[in-house]
Image (cartoon, rainbow, N blue to C red):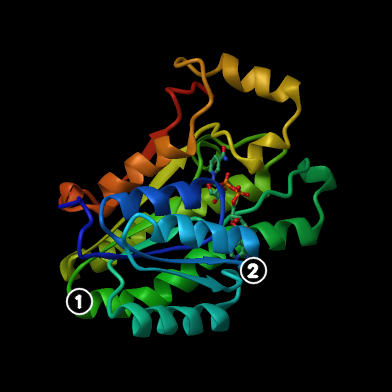
Amino acid sequence: MGLLTGKTALITGAARGIGKAIALKFAEEGANIAFTDLVIDENGEATRQEIEAKGVKCQAYASNAADFAQTAEVVKKVHEDFGSIDVLVNNAGITKDGLMIRMTEQQWDAVIGVNLKSAFNFIHACTPIMMRQRGGSIINMASVVGVHGNAGQSNYAASKAGMIALAKSVAQEMGSRGVRANAIAPGFIETAMTAALSEEVRKEWMKAIPLRRGGKPEDIADVATFLASDLASYVTGQVIQVDGGMNM
Ligand code: NAI
């Protein structure tokens, strides 16, 4: 029996990258998987098939996580399709970097909308279900820059700091109903998001990492599996940095 056998997990933005690695790891541990992404194209469908090949049920849903009404609708659909939602991973995220002096209102609104409001949207829609079940695990994908800040990423860092505070607050509100909420703060993880960075920036990051390598999506998936599982049944309101010991 896997660590997540019998549980249904809903993961946002999981067609690729960290979300996909989490979905695959959860499926290996026996969870049925519902995942969203902006569109479910060939890549999303290939991800769905890869997850299903682990021997679990998997459905993919096209939905904009930043949209409150679409989120309510997709959560209702997932609940109808799967009968429960035991684990929610708020993973969808974007960057639109720039120094504050040059940052536009659009850059600010887009990043806060996709990264932070999306987490509100999904938590708002899922917690009534989890409270009725008297159990659930919410995992917000934050970032080390949400803990330390980062020049050129004030919108992104603020959104990630918000996800940490959101998890801690929900943990306090929902603990008595058996619902746990935690945040993971990844450091430098090798995905499409970080592939866009220049070699110079990558070298600077590597110097700050005692383990001397970028993280793999699977490094995050392992910690997410712990938080989703009953191994973490007394862990709530925490932020776990998964960053190779990065000194920022
Ligand atoms: P990625 O860009 O490879 O994947 C993000 C996924 O989210 C994509 O499939 C994208 O289509 C989806 N997405 C974007 N906007 C969406 C929306 N409005 N609604 C639904 N889905 C949407 O990124 P990656 O690296 O896998 O990141 C995943 C999460 O981890 C993000 O929240 C990111 O901020 C966070 N993170 C990543 C780090 C890294 O080094 N890669 C470090 C720290 C945090």
Q: Is residue 179 above or below residue 155?
A: below
Please state if 43 lies on the left or on the right of 119 as rendered. right
Label number found at residue 133: 1
Q: Is residue 185 above or below residue 52?
A: above
In the figure, residue 100 lies in which quadrant? top right
At a point 55% along the width and 46% down the height, the residue shown is 17
> Residues under labels 2 and 1: Cα distance?
30 Å
The residue nearer to you, when weighing 67 against 39, is 39
Percent position of residue 188, x then y: 55, 31
Q: How many marks?
A: 2
Q: Is residue 93 visible?
A: yes
In the figure, residue 92 lies in which quadrant? bottom right
The residue nearer to you, when weighing 27 against 158, is 27
Q: Residues within 10 Å of mark 2 (few under 14, many from 20)?
A: some
Establish whether ligand 1 lies closer than 8 Å to the Cβ of label 2. yes
At a point 45% along the width and 29% down the height, the residue shown is 243
Label 2 sits on a secondary structure element that is loop
Label number found at residue 189: none
At a point 72% along the width and 32% down the height, the residue shown is 197
At a point 31% along the width and 50% down the height, the residue shown is 28
Q: Is residue 165 visible?
A: no
Q: Residue furthest right?
A: 102
Q: Amino acid at mark 2?
A: Val
Label 1 sits on a secondary structure element that is helix
Establish whether ligand 1 lies closer than 8 Å to the Cβ of label 1. no
Please state if 205 lies on the left or on the right of 197 as rendered. left
Q: Is residue 192 above or below residue 199?
A: below
The residue nearer to you, when weighing 197 against 42, is 42
Q: Amino acid at mark 1?
A: Gln
Q: Residues within 10 Å of mark 1 (few under 14, many from 20)?
A: some
Percent position of residue 248, x then y: 54, 24
Label number found at residue 39: 2
